[in-house]
Amino acid sequence: MTFVDGPVTVRVPATSANLGPGFDSLGLALTWYDEVTAEVTGSGLVFDIEGEGADEVPRDETHLLYRAMDAAFDLLAERPAGLRLTCRNTIPHGRGLGSSAAVIAAGVVLARALVVGGDDRMDDRTMFGLATDLEGHPDNVAPALFGGFTISWVDGAAAETLRLDVESDLTVFVPPEPVATSLARGLLPATVPHADASFNAGRAALLVAALTTAPERLISATEDRLHQTYRAEAMPDSYKLVRQLRVEGVPAVVSGAGPTVLAFAGGLEAWTPRGWLHRELRVSPRGADIVP
Ligand SMILES: Nc1ncnc2c1ncn2[C@@H]1O[C@H](COP(=O)(O)OP(=O)(O)OP(=O)(O)O)[C@@H](O)[C@H]1O
Ligand SMILES: N[C@@H](CCO)C(=O)O
């Protein structure tokens, strides 16, 4: 038998990338989850999608979940005759909360779990490399797959990550309208001043210490000169909220490519702009997990 009998379900966390100075490297898994179920069938591709993005995402081979599973089946050298895919989406799309990384992580984990002996044929590092190739950068897929706080980098063609356990009160402020990551990346300059690169290197190093042992340093540790200001024109209200919170001493950053604002603190509901969603979260110690 090549494939397991019956459905397999994975629960996968939202993630926040960059965290201020750690552009394309640092990421946190959040206690906010999508659930995706896959079952091998005799033929065809059937989607059942509810929740976030249900009216926008395709229901064919171009769906990101299918594309991730397809790439994983290629690596596993197995191909099911048909698939039934059920998505229970709660992570908002295009808001800087790692929705694309979540669905990619779910896809590669599900494909591996559906193949009998899949764990022996695709190790975690290979799975992470594949997910990074699909997403384009490793900072969201690492915490989506492994949970916790992740420091990721690309060494030649190989994606690498180091995972740490951290705890923090977190608040996300989610605006009603999305900003596509591709648009936000298009606003970044090709080169940056040496002084700004040096500034961010120091802050990113400090952030690792602040999140693990020195939380009183979080306000300095979350400063950034490499991406948020360049992207402000695409998300002026997010940029403004980050600045207002920081003036009050609250460590706040744009989450991922935005426009969500992430603060390393709770009890901030009064700061919620009209029409935005406010949610208090923690760091999820778990990444994409098979639901027993
Ligand atoms: N659950 C999903 N099912 C299908 N497609 C999805 C899903 N989640 C995200 N996508 C696709 O990814 C796009 C959003 O990806 P994008 O990289 O722009 O934002 P994000 O991943 O939500 O934020 P960020 O990468 O900044 O954290 C959606 O518009 C959709 O095309
Ligand atoms: N590092 C990425 C995260 C969003 O995918 C960016 O800021 O573009």
Image (tube, rainbow, N blue to C red):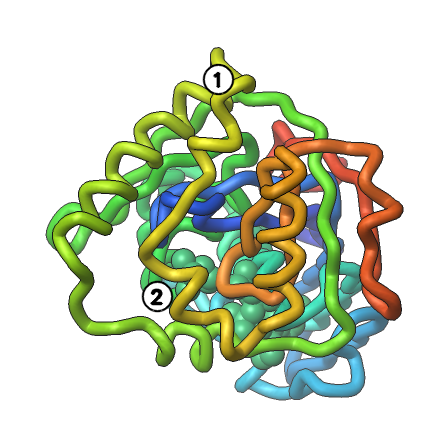
Nearer to us in this view, 242 or 1: 242
Crowding near the residue tagged with mark 2, few <14, some 14–19, many ≥20 C-alpha atoms within 10 Å = few
Mark nearest the camera among 2 and 1 is 1
Q: Taking the image as drawn, is residue 162 in sight?
A: yes
Tell me if the residue at label 1 has its CB under 8 Å from ligand 2: no
- The CA span between labels 2 and 1 is 28 Å
| Residue 205 x %, y % | 31, 29
Q: Residue furthest top?
A: 213
- Mark 1 residue type: Thr
Q: Residue at x 71, y 29 (%)?
A: 169
Check disc 1 and report the residue beneath it: 212
Quarter of the image where one finds residue 199: top left
Residue 138 in picture, x, y percent from top left: 37, 52
Residue 78 as seen in the image, left or right of residue 275: left
* Quadrant in the rendering for residue 43: bottom right
Residue picked out by circle 2: 136
Q: Tally the numbered discs.
A: 2
Residue 285 in percent (x, y) is at 62, 28
- The amino acid type, in three-letter code, at marker 2 is Gly
Does mark 2 have its CB less than 8 Å from ligand 2? yes
Kindly state the secondary structure of the residue where label 2 is placed.
loop
Q: Secondary structure at mark 1?
A: helix
Q: Position of residue 3 (x, y in %)?
A: 57, 55
Q: Is residue 163 left or right of residue 218?
A: left
